[in-house]
Image (spheres, helix red, strand yellow):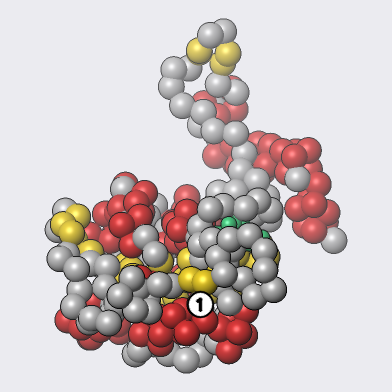
Amino acid sequence: MSDTPDKPKSHGRLQIAASVKPRVLMEEPMLLKGAWVARIITLFPDAFPGTLGLSLTGKALEMGRWRLEPIDLRGFGIGKHRNVDDTPAGGGAGMVLRADVVDAALRVAADGCPRDRARWPVVYLSPRGRPFDQATARKWAAADGITLLCGRFEGVDQRVLDHWEIEEVSLGDFVLTGGEIAAQAMLDATVRLIPGVLGNAESIEEESHSNGLLEHPQYTRPQEWEGREIPAVLTSGDHGKIARWRREEAEKLTAARRPDLWAKRQG
Ligand SMILES: C[S@@+](CC[C@H](N)C(=O)[O-])C[C@H]1O[C@@H](n2cnc3c(N)ncnc32)[C@H](O)[C@@H]1O
């Protein structure tokens, strides 16, 4: 196993390198204290930053408001071919990521991190997990950082998940080919809650799921489009009325589309 990182890829001013050691530990240990850090254990480090490198999350990444540390699972593979997986015990289709290989990656990911899981959650992206939601994104954003383990094939040997007491979190009730897309979706939802990432903090307070309601409908110019007008109240200039209208619309929408959320709010 080599500790030598691959040649860093340029991403604007940002340098992202997939390595068996997170770059933050090798070169800039002090940065752990500052920016929020995401360590991603993956067989496909090239998948990152992906969409996280765009728009506001990308800008925040460039500005160092958060850091992305992909850790290449292949670097911990066994033998000449760096095998990371093997056939499932008991038979059956597919392959399973080996406990010893995943453990080695988790150890490197844990290096220098707080052990308190409230400050540094360690998560396996998994369709068997607790569904991800806005409350989880808020909790993660308030931590110092996170380690996300992306599975592939049939998943990960259960023993390493038990040993590390890893929390399993799901993107939804469907099966993806790997954890990378789930990791990006969850990171996007989390990173935008880190102070300074979004320009307008108010937009976080009012949007869907921030207060148990779905967001009210939004409109912009032109005033009339295809015979449809912007609701008159929104151009009335009466901010009290506008706020009331938005609240009522949000409530109507939530009750109609998400009776589960509405019932929770009423209860
Ligand atoms: C093909 S899936 C494995 C599914 C597993 N055999 C099962 O039935 O639960 C491969 C990997 O994709 C990721 N994955 C798939 N669906 C996911 C979801 N809904 N949420 C989060 N991660 C998911 C996990 O990391 C998983 O290990």
Quadrant observed for ligand 1 in the rendered image? bottom right
Q: Total marks drawn?
A: 1
Q: Residues within 10 Å of mark 1 (few under 14, many from 20)?
A: many
Q: Looking at the picture, tell me which residue is in the foreground, 156 or 24.
A: 156
Q: Is residue 257 above or below residue 195?
A: above
Q: Residue at left 75%, top 53%? A: 261
Q: Looking at the picture, tell me which residue is in the foreground, 54 or 65.
A: 54
Mark 1: which secondary structure?
Answer: loop
Q: Is residue 211 visible?
A: no
Q: Quadrant of the C terminus?
A: bottom right
Q: Viewed as shown, does residue 149 lie left or right of 262?
A: left
Q: Looking at the picture, tell me which residue is in the foreground, 198 or 14.
A: 14
Q: Amino acid at mark 1?
A: Arg
Q: Is residue 1 visible?
A: yes
Q: Point out residue 84 in the picture as x, y percentages from the top left corner.
A: 43, 72
Q: Residue at left 48%, top 66%? A: 150
Q: Point out residue 250 in the picture as x, y percentages from the top left corner.
A: 67, 42
Q: Looking at the picture, tell me which residue is in the foreground, 58 or 18.
A: 18
Is label 1's Cβ within 8 Å of ligand 1?
no
Q: Is residue 246 above or below residue 201?
A: above
Q: Point out residue 38 in the picture as x, y percentages from the top left corner.
A: 38, 71
Q: Residue at left 36%, top 85%? A: 108
Q: Residue at left 31%, top 57%? A: 46
The single residue placed furthest to the top in the displayed view is 227
Q: Is residue 251 above or below residue 178?
A: above
Judging by the rendered image, the residue that carries numbered circle 1 is 98
Q: Point out residue 25 in the picture as x, y percentages from the top left corner.
A: 25, 84
Q: Quadrant of the N terminus?
A: bottom left
